[in-house]
Image (tube, helix red, strand yellow):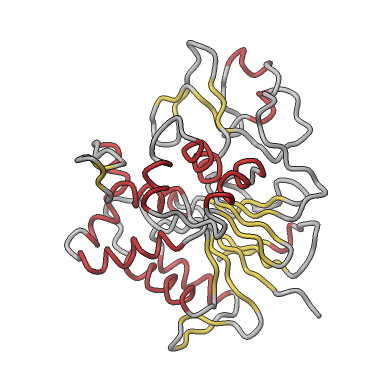
Amino acid sequence: MDAQGYDIIGDIHGHADELVKLLRHLGYRETERGFYHDSRKVVFLGDFIDRGEHLRQHQKLLDIVMTMVKNGNAHSVMGNHEFNALAFHTEHQGEYLRPRTEKNVQQHQAFLNEFDDESELKGEVLDFFYSLPLWLELDGIRVVHACWDDEFIDVMRERIPNGRLDRTLLIEASTKGTSAYYAVETLLKGVEVELPEGITFKDKDGHVRDAVRVKWWKANAERLGDIALPDGIDIGHAAAEQVPDYISKYHTDQLPCFIGHYWLDGEPEPLAPNVACLDYSVAKKGKLVAYRWSGESTLRKEKFTHI
């Protein structure tokens, strides 16, 4: 029996029109039960929302996604922006789990534009976000938004076998120092390494950072400069430091793993023989990218596609 075919789609960030174009390009047709393909299913990598203060396509996008998932035409994992939204709209002990700072409000503004005056609809969307697992294993592939880490997945699997957060675990995962916090940070945002005192850099949004995300899929890397993200970042003498032992290593004999999150550019291709990122920065005038998986254990450049 042939493996189920999956079309894995990267971070969309409210770009509904781009999603419709991509689905049609992939051969999905619109039905009463949402976009459908006779022999394939979509796997979404999360980050459906946010970015672009004036963008108003979130309701259209979420209607497409929620309908497809509800009717079995698609699967999805949670992205860090869905997690952030749940925390932004959840009060605990008189305060919101995600503080409503100017930075956090600005990042979430595109969602607020369309849902702040639609309390019932917003509630349905947040319930949908709760239904999204932190990771998926499907017919020979693994799917997670930012980083597959067996240790943290095992930690969370003991608490939530289905991988889905509830309010209690959302509160714990929003509390720095807990095991759930570090697990969710890693799975949804990637592995972070603190830089030596005095070394900082500005991220893509202009915020000063003193810790760097890393390419956890480069199992044989020896120096921090070899795995620092984004490519070409200047981390001074820290580049010569050894890769910390605590960084998860994903070896080439493990199942193919699909991720989003990393705002790549250029022509899509595998990050490793068995790791592919599908986030090619559609929210920064990049591409909405899919990978057409049909059972292969070694991922191939020609299986990426985009409009």
Residue at image position (76%, 36%) is: 219
* Residue 146 horizontal/vertical position (percent): 56, 46
The residue lying toward the viewer, choosing from 18 and 157, is 157
Residue at the far left in the pictured view? 117
The residue lying toward the viewer, choosing from 57 and 155, is 155
Residue at the far bottom in the pictured view? 32
Residue at image position (50%, 53%) is: 286
* Residue 140 horizontal/vertical position (percent): 74, 63
The residue lying toward the viewer, choosing from 51 and 295, is 295
Q: How many marks?
A: 0
Residue at image position (77%, 68%) is: 295
Q: Quadrant of the C terminus?
A: bottom right
**In-image side of 47 versus 85 (left or right):** right
* Residue 158 horizontal/vertical position (percent): 58, 49
Quadrant in the rendering for residue 66: bottom left
Q: In this view, does 235 lie above or below 291?
A: above
Q: Quadrant of the N terminus?
A: bottom right
Residue at the far front in the pictured view? 158
**In-image side of 49 versus 35 (left or right):** left
